[in-house]
Amino acid sequence: MSTVPDLQFEIVARDACSHARCGILHLPHGDVETPVFMPVGTQGTVKAMTQEELEALDFRIILCNTYHLYLRPGHERVARAGGLHRFIAWHRNILTDSGGFQVFSLQALRRVYEDGVEFRSHLDGSTHYFTPERAIAVQHALGADIIMAFDECPPNPSSYEQARAAMERTHRWAVRCLQAHDTAQALFGIVQGSVYEDLRAESARFISELDFPGIAIGGVAVGEEKAEIHRVVAFTAPLLPVEKPRYLMGVGEPDDILQAVACGVDMFDCVLPTRLARNAAMMTRRGRVNLRNARFAEEFGPVDPECDCPVCQRYSAAYLHHLFKAKEILAARLATFHNLYFYQRFMAQIRRAIREGNLEQFRGEFLQSYTPEQEPVPREE
Ligand SMILES: [Zn+2]
């Protein structure tokens, strides 16, 4: 029933020593160079940034959350506004998730059936029911360029039986999503299987055989150790069709991105840069720093001397420290801008390294001076 998806993926360079590639996603609202990092705009806003600022940062695609927009302001209202692009005044590309991840995170507030999931709104406790068909209909109303299949993301840790059951339901739901899909929006399938390699292989095979123009790896970075994330991605990504874009959902630590890119992943999203910024953490070439730390009180130079973003060019670490201490709204704005700039520059460096054939060298140099963070990201979004 599905019509021809409005997405072309062109691979323009390949790394000789890994699965990494550079590509261009040709989408209705402009081209997107990959590997790409998509900032998260949960409520139709990348928190603390204006759309003008996202454009200034040269983001070509952002992610919005179906679950949140469905509950408020409601997908029907968004449709009456002319769709999500018009409603939020963002004229570039949008990807919406299916709501599955949020619904399954509600634990105490949800009940899973073969047909779908009943859940209670975290806003007012009202009861709702999402089926694959409903998740697709809501995403049709929102009108994003890329939409996602409704999947079951099992918690971590999950027993083998639990992971298998979630994977098999995800497969049945993937077929139903495709059957319900009749617009030109690009509908991506999602591979599940938790940390079990035979399940990941089975899921990769099943989802790859369906008619999706892009494929996501779901159920990763849901609380497992870094080494476990790397193992699952290294195993799963190369099993996906080479000619389709591959999207690793919710993974965004720079060292994890580097590893996944080498495994052939093209697309990333994560709340990391924006959420960290609101918690006074700024990304630098050496790792994360916390601006509330007293050592910045009289640091009159920039937060990251190696950063050429407008924030670091103009404002001192001491000033940012003061803004965070005083709980000024500007603190979150400046830190968010810097963190998003960090990601844009990082992804551009990765793409250049792939094109120039020295990704491995770039990765080595980057990891030599960058200390990966072991602290978890604070929850809130
Ligand atoms: Zn900066």
Image (spheres, rainbow, N blue to C red):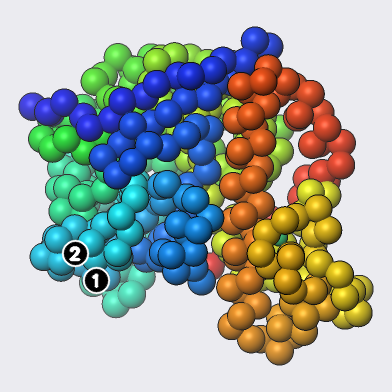
Q: Residue at x 21, y 50 (%)?
A: 143
Q: Are marks 1 and 2 in contact (CB under 8 Å)?
A: yes
Q: Secondary structure at mark 1?
A: loop
Where is residue 86 drawn, in percent x and y?
A: 23, 62
Q: Residue at x 62, y 55 (%)?
A: 341
Residue sitting at the far left:
1
Q: Amino acid at mark 1?
A: Pro
Asked if one can make out residue 248 in the rendered structure from this viewpoint, the answer is no
Residue labelled with disc 1? 73
Q: Residues within 10 Å of mark 1 (few under 14, many from 20)?
A: few
Q: Is residue 218 above or below residue 66?
A: above
Q: Position of residue 232 (x, y in %)?
A: 59, 26
Where residue 278 sits, quadrant-wise, is bottom right
Q: Is residue 66 above or below residue 95?
A: below
Q: Is residue 251 above or below residue 26?
A: below
Where on the picture, by quarter, is residue 309? bottom right
Q: Residues within 10 Å of mark 2 (few under 14, many from 20)?
A: many
Q: Residue at x 59, y 83 (%)?
A: 329
Image quarter for residue 87? Answer: bottom left
Secondary structure type for disc 2: helix
Query: Looking at the picture, which amino acid does disc 2 mark?
Result: Val
First in sequence: mark 1 or mark 2? 1
Quadrant location of ligand 1?
bottom right
Instruction: Look at the numbered disc 2 and say if its residue's Cβ is closer than 8 Å to ligand 1.
Output: no
Label at residue 78: 2
Give the residue at the far top of this rendering: 16
Q: Is residue 218 left or right of residue 321?
A: left
